[in-house]
Amino acid sequence: MNAALLPNDAHDADLLAHAHPPDWVNPPPARSYNLVVLGGGTAGLVTAVGAAALGAKVALVEKNLMGGDCLNFGCVPSKALLRSARFYADVSFSGRLTGGDPIPSEADFAAAMERMRRLRAQLSRRDSAERLRQLGIDVFLGAAAFVDSRHVEVAGAMLAFKKAVIATGSRAAQPAIEGIEEAGYLTNETAFNLTARPSRLLVIGGGPLGCELAQAFGRLGSQVIIAHQTPYFLPDEERDAAEILAYSLRRDGIDVRLNTEVKSVTRSDDGKLARLVNYDQDETIAVDEILAGVGRAPNVEGLNLEAAGVEYDLKKGVRVNDFLQTTRRNIYAAGDVALAQKYTHMADATARLVIQNALFLGRKRLSSLIVPWCTYTDPEIAHVGAYVEDARERGFRMKTFTVPMSEADRAVLDGDEEGFVKIHVREGTDTILGATIVARHAGEMINEISLAMVAGIGLKTVSQVIHSYPTQAEAIRKAGDAYSRTRLTPFLAKVSRRWLAWSRG
């Protein structure tokens, strides 16, 4: 069984039967393939399924688990756990919703983890090796390596191709902390194996993964400390959004340590001792488990990319141009292995570009994509497009319209007043350049802004869209209303008053 799955667990055995069947027999290779895809994660699956549906002869190679990081160790298990954790948080804050005393409830950590494994196994059927075979794709399980720019070898078989796609994804980066390897630590690839709640948990890193899992474990009953080297979580996001996140973590009882570096880790009779340094403060804490979320590393090792003439960097991944071609023009790359934005939906989007560019001489550009993203804490933090800093660096003027969630009636009724909708437009126009939303359902709400940007719909038009009442998305329309009010210049206001006065007779 895969080391990242639990032995003797019925749900993980079900997952393995779909994602890497123990009795799988690789097919005999075709004489030549239109497309050979390396990697069975989101980017590889979308590429292979899409190309096969268009009539291409496709081979897909996966050495680990079909579904990749998203299904097995990322989006799917983490969001299942976050949902369970949110339930217990709502119970603990139930007094705000009922008007009475909070309902006592202790989180059942083992049950929440079992639910996660069950749902993950259920969803694995969509990405199963057998389903792909039924779609006409030749599925090869094993490690692949390029022989040259036209051939890949896997499990002793030689696959000849006209075009190839590298979609091998990424993995958790190894933290450069003295003693942590010897002491042992968790990553997203091993944290979901836990069946017993760690009483004391140190989370290293305040990026999306670290913040999400810190909040989830805290709400499920662990005493959590989160240490982050910079003054704000999510350093790429709006500062006010990061401040709300820090507040929400503290509200959930998490010990937040910003401007804090983990210098070393050692083992002791009291667990794992981590040395934390914050300016001139030096403290050693004892914890039961350490979860490291310090970034991602591209999976480029072992592919023999040199033989194919494909350039790469161990930190940045495979080098691609704006059409997602590598330095060998018949070989493309998609998803985490080549991109700075390591999101499942980005892997999906780039796979769709690759299909068009590789098989149909398309010229679809990576730079043309408008990509939203979301950190699924509570409240969620979602963003699309430009930030204020981007405008300053590029030398254009931007105007921002901000609506607190407390001005959306549904948010007040739901007890979700934390957060805001912030929309940036090019000054003097209603052209939307970007947006940040902090709200319980920000990940759903940001899609309206993304659609407007893709379709070229301005903020004025957004304000004219009738939103069902009451919804939290009304805050988006209110931002549009705020823009529309700025168009009422003093001259127009004067004309309007005179007209209305005249019309009264």
Image (spheres, rainbow, N blue to C red):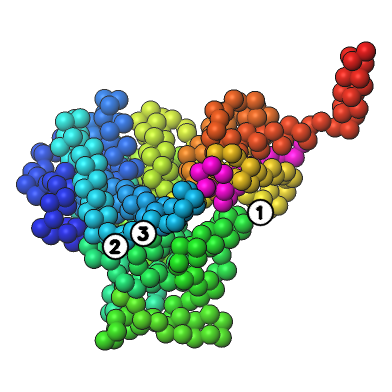
Image quarter for residue 129? Answer: top left
Mark 1 vs 2, N-terminal side: 2
Point 57% across, 44% down: residue: 412
Q: Residue 417: x percent and y percent?
A: 57, 48
Mark 3 neighbour density, 10 Å: few (under 14) some (14–19) many (20 or more):
few
Q: The disc labelled 3 sits on which kind of residue? A: Pro
Any magenta on residue 19?
no
Quarter holding the C terminus is top right
Closer to the camera: disc 1 or disc 2? 2
**Residues tagged 3 and 1 counted as in contact (Cβ below 8 A):** no
Q: The disc labelled 1 sits on which kind of residue? A: Glu
Residue placed most toward the observer, 140 or 505: 505
Point 27% across, 26% down: residue: 53
Q: Is residue 144 left or right of residue 308?
A: left
Rounded to the nearest whole Å, what is the CA distance between mark 1 and mark 2? 35 Å
Mark 1: secondary structure? helix
Q: Residue 409: x percent and y percent?
A: 59, 39
Q: Is residue 235 left or right of residue 51?
A: right
* Part of the protein shown in magenta: 412-428
Rounded to the nearest whole Å, what is the CA distance between mark 2 and mark 3? 27 Å
Q: Is residue 429 left or right of residue 110?
A: right
Q: Is residue 441 left or right of residue 267?
A: right
Q: Residue 319: x percent and y percent?
A: 43, 52
Q: Which residue is mark 3?
A: 104
Q: Which mark is residue 191?
A: 2
Rounded to the nearest whole Å, what is the CA distance between mark 3 and mark 1? 45 Å
Residue placed most toward the observer, 168 or 422: 422
Q: Which residue is mark 1?
A: 389
Q: Is residue 484 visible?
A: yes
